[in-house]
Amino acid sequence: MTLIKKSIDIKDEELILTNQRALFWKRENVLVLSDIHIGKTAHFRKHGIPMPDNILDNDLERLKSLILHFEAKNIWIVGDLFHAENNGNMATFKSWLHQFEDLKITLIKGNHDRLLNEIMDDFNIKVETELNVPPFKFIHEPTNDNNQLFTIAGHIHPGVMIKGKGRQKLRLPCFQVSDEQLILPAFSEFTGLNTRLKPENCVNFAFTETAIFEF
């Protein structure tokens, strides 16, 4: 894994964007990410759709590398940690968590996070509907409300379309940053990209495996 970082300043706080689909907030020593969708591959297999075996493993390996690199003590997941019903992917995730006994995980519930609270307790995950840590408000779905706090959200899996020569088009995941909010890319690579929705006056920080580009 090649880790590329870009620091941005929002509300006098340093946020470090990465090309590995997460950001790091120095002040709180926290990794912030969204839309992991654990359980999605097992859910698809259950319904007869063949899926590669290594999708979740690759996502968790990237997350492990980020935790170790930043020496993060906290993870805040801005929705859709899980995708569907309790299935075999959850057991994989629980086993993976055992290597990080001191890691504190907070989930801001998304529209796919429907597992029972007892299951969340078993994973030792704190669950919130929103999280206010000034100057930021963490929620799953982006909002157009005029909040006093700058919003950090996920949900829409933002991406950009770059046109090349002829009919060539390249789609890249991105962070979308405007005056009032930051929208995170989906952490899992097993997600679509929404290249149609772009908040007004936003800057796109798109990325590849080797670079971060500002549009």
Image: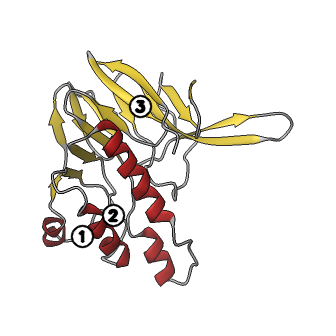
Horizontal and vertical percent for residue 157?
47, 47
Q: Give the residue pinned by disc 1.
A: 115
Query: What amino acid does circle 2 point to?
Result: Phe
Which of the numbered marks, if any, corresponds to residue 17? Answer: 3
Which tag, 1 or 2, sits closer to the chain's start? 2
Q: In the structure shown, which secondary structural element does the residue marked by tag 2 occupy?
A: loop
Query: What amino acid does circle 1 point to?
Result: Leu
Q: Quadrant of the C terminus?
A: top right
* Alpha carbon separation for disc pair 3 and 2: 23 Å
Q: Give the residue pinned by disc 2.
A: 82
Mark 3 neighbour density, 10 Å: few (under 14) some (14–19) many (20 or more)? many
* Alpha carbon separation for disc pair 1 and 3: 30 Å
Which tag, 3 or 2, sits closer to the chain's start? 3
Quarter holding residue 121: bottom left
Q: Decide if residue 136 is on the left or right side of residue 23.
A: left
Horizontal and vertical percent for residue 27?
20, 27
